[in-house]
Image: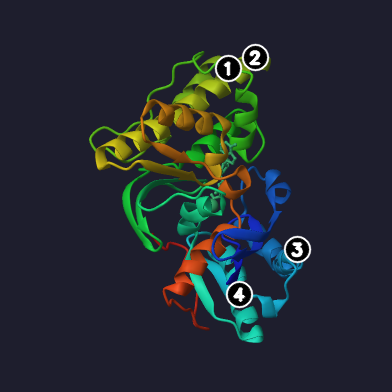
Amino acid sequence: MRVLGIETSCDETAAAVVEDGRRALSDVVATQIDVHRRWGGVVPELASRNHVVQVMPVVDEALSRAGVGPDGVDAIAVTSGPGLVGALLVGVQAAKALAAAWGKPLVRVNHLEGHLVAAFLAETAPAFPFLGLVVSGGHTSLYAARAFGEYQLLGHTRDDAAGEAFDKGAKLLGLPYPGGVAIDRLAREGDPGAIRFPKAIVKGADLDFSFSGLKTALLHHVKKHGVPEGRGLADLCASYQEAIVRALVEKAFRAARRLQFDRLVLSGGVAANSRLRAAAAARAAEYEGMSVFLPAVKLCTDNAAMIAVAGTHAYLRGERAGPELNADPAWRL
Ligand code: KG4
Ligand code: ZN
């Protein structure tokens, strides 16, 4: 079966056609990064307006790259939350209109579930149950994934998301949006041990995360020493990145060990981080029998193929959305 996925929850307008929940026949992403960069972050109203312009061309492109017309699609899956309400509404309305016009069933998908199941588009997919860590611009959440549609939240961030820590940190250093990409690039030339940042770990609440203290530590560092250039900037980026990565890897593996998971799936935009990928793979190699699944970078950041995967299984479970479907900006998974 083929599902058309549509995703507009933040600043990427995306559409994809996925076959049998496993193979992306097309995966089109129109990014708005250039629109938002001059403002230093995503401007919700601009995001909505750009989605309006992009959504139909992106859907057309996804169908054409997949080599199918509307008749070749069995269902439409759309992200209805969480995310920016105006941005979500554009995708939801487009999906409802297409479902009505083409006479196709519609299913709603939680954006976080999309991230969790992106790994099923890789050649080697994880098996259930697995421990899933979603690390994105808006979320840092650890889930026990027992089956498609069955997720238990084990821990989450108390304040900033990991992606926010990257983005806000980058802003302090005068680096362009999205900060994660800029820090990742600069950090490659730097020494992660150059500057000591506090451990981004919450005491007591064991599987929760906290990144705001780290951001404050960076602010103090910059106030005291200024923003360095050249090698100094690379060292600062590498050290800051290392503190975020260490917190994520430590928590994820602690949870996996305690709850006896032998599969860990990383996803979300921050899972594109080269240091996080290397550190997670290295840590897994230390533990016998532990497998880490890292979706390709393109599948870690926002895309519609992952929405189509989640939508395929929601459809197979019999879930359907009607014309009353609305955006649900705070939908919890
Ligand atoms: O999943 P995503 O595309 O959108 C949300 O659902 O939020 O994640 C975006 C976040 C941004 O905070 C961005 O800075 C971060 O992912 N990001 C990265 C990297 N690429 C994207 N963070 C660290 N290293 C990267 N290479
Ligand atoms: Zn996302």
Q: Are marks 3 and 2 in contact (CB under 8 Å)?
A: no
Q: Amino acid at mark 2?
A: Arg
Marks 4 and 3 sit apart, C-alpha to C-alpha, by 19 Å
Helix, strand or loop at mark 2: helix
Nearer the observer: mark 3 or 2; the answer is 3
Residue 180 is situated, as x and y percent measured from the top left of the image, at 58, 36
Helix, strand or loop at mark 3: helix
Q: Amino acid at mark 1?
A: Asp
Residue 102 is situated, as x and y percent measured from the top left of the image, at 65, 84
Residue at image point 58% right, 56% down: 10
Q: Are marks 4 and 3 in contact (CB under 8 Å)?
A: no
Position of 233 relative to 109 (above/below): above
Q: Amino acid at mark 3?
A: Arg
**Residue 231: which disc?**
2
Marks 1 and 4 sit apart, C-alpha to C-alpha, by 46 Å
Q: Amino acid at mark 4?
A: Ala
Of the numbered discs 4 and 2, the one sitting upstream in the chain is 4
Residue 6, by quadrant, is bottom right
**Residue 95: which disc?**
4
Few, some or many residues within 10 Å of mark 4 (<14, 14–19, 20+): many
Position of 245 relative to 59 (above/below): above
Few, some or many residues within 10 Å of mark 3 (<14, 14–19, 20+): some
Nearer the observer: mark 4 or 2; the answer is 4
Position of 19 relative to 11 (above/below): below
Residue at image point 64% right, 25% down: 186
Marks 2 and 1 sit apart, C-alpha to C-alpha, by 6 Å
Task: Judge left or right: residue 139 versus residue 168.
Answer: left
